[in-house]
Image: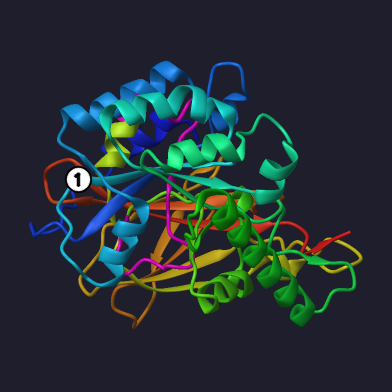
Amino acid sequence: MKSFSLILLLLLVGPFVRAEEPVPPHAVVFMYHHVSEATPPSTSVSPASFRAHLEYLDENGFRVRPLAEIVAALAGEQALPDSVVAITFDDGYRSVYETAYPLLREKGWPFTVFVSSEAIDGGHGPVMTWEQLREMGENGAAIASHGRHHHHLQRLRGGESRADWAARLKADLQHSLDRMKAETGQENRMLAYPFGESDQPLRDLVADMGWVGFGQQSGAMGELSDRSCLPRFPMATGFDQPEDFALKAASLPLPVTGVRAEDLLLRFSEESVIIGAEPPGLQLRLEAGFSGLTAYASGQGQALVRPLDGQDGAVEITARRPLPPGRSRYNVTAPFGSGGRWYWYSYTWIVGQAHDD
């Protein structure tokens, strides 16, 4: 769905307004890949657009904080002022060093770059060098992991047991951490999942290792957010317009206290695809008294929202049509007070193979 369509749907939501209350502790994290006009639009914003985002934050009183500091504050239930944001980049592309970094350094703002250590070691693609990452690290950048390899981390290899998969993943993540520490002196146990993809076993593994995981699903971070898959707003051409950026920067975390969702990877056998005819249902339990949700499914527009009988604050969200192979998301929103701000939550479905060939 194009960003302007989502904004229009938000503005057309019914008259529900939740009672005025203090703004909950939260922060918004933005995720970029390329900052260039010469790279694929689906993973790029133009230099002019990126500059406009920074100017909007500066002119509207937003505080740009280090990502690790924000996570620690929310985990410890420490006070965070309103309008706190973090800026992150996945893959470590050269355009970040050449274009984004000078603008951020000029403002003295921190940011985080998630890199795949093998890509940096081998110079695979238009990526930065360790020397450039060290320079940025000395000037406000945190260097963190995007995995040793830019692979689908949740997938098992052919014939691989779950125990062997876990041992391999732990070794790969430790290797990426060791390489970053050796080259930059930094040891940030933060992982951005490649492609924004994860499943429950992967998230459990990351949590057991004492790491913090980040996805590419939209929404603000709050005290109730899952530290093994924290949300970030992906920025790309078509989703980076000023009104869209402003809406996301002011968003708040939907107070989700419980999630129940089918793992669509289980719909696939080793021999053939087993896709059910019905779209999956996402069950959310919210803080008592919360209602008035609107939901959207990727490429389908508004989804169905049904209160669950006998379960106060629980709803089930279902797309109107089956999900296609690949990544799809349910975006869930509700208005906060009467000031034009929105609660926002997103859930990612992966309709695809559970094993690599």
Residue 250 visible in the picture: yes
As for residue 231 lying within the magenta part, the answer is yes
State whether residue 17 is above or below residue 101: below
Residue shown at 33% from the left, 53% from the top: 220
Q: Which residue is mark 1?
A: 83
Give percent across and percent down for residue 214. Answer: 48, 57
Residue shown at 25% from the left, 64% from the top: 73
Give percent across and percent down for residue 37. Answer: 55, 16
Left or right: 308 with respect to 93? left
As for residue 293 lying within the magenta part, the answer is no
The quarter of the displayed image where residue 287 is located? bottom left
Q: Nearer the viewer, residue 114 or 105?
A: 105
The C terminus sits in image quarter: bottom right
Give percent across and percent down for residue 132. Answer: 54, 34
Residue 321 visible in the picture: no
Q: How is the image coloured?
A: rainbow
Left or right: 146 with respect to 16? right
Residue shown at 50% from the left, 31% from the top: 236
Q: Nearer the viewer, residue 77 or 284?
A: 77
Q: Nearer the viewer, residue 156 or 136?
A: 136
Left or right: 196 with respect to 74? right
Q: Count of labels shown?
A: 1
| Magenta part, dominant SS | loop
Check disc 1 and give the amino acid type: Ser
State whether residue 171 is above or below residue 92: below
The quarter of the displayed image where residue 264 is located? bottom right
Left or right: 334 with respect to 269? left
Q: Nearer the viewer, residue 64 or 270?
A: 64
Q: Tell me which segment is drawn in magenta.
A: 221-243
Mark 1 packing: few (<14 Cα in 10 Å), some, or many (20+)?
Answer: some
Give percent across and percent down for residue 150. Answer: 69, 49
Q: Secondary structure at mark 1?
A: loop
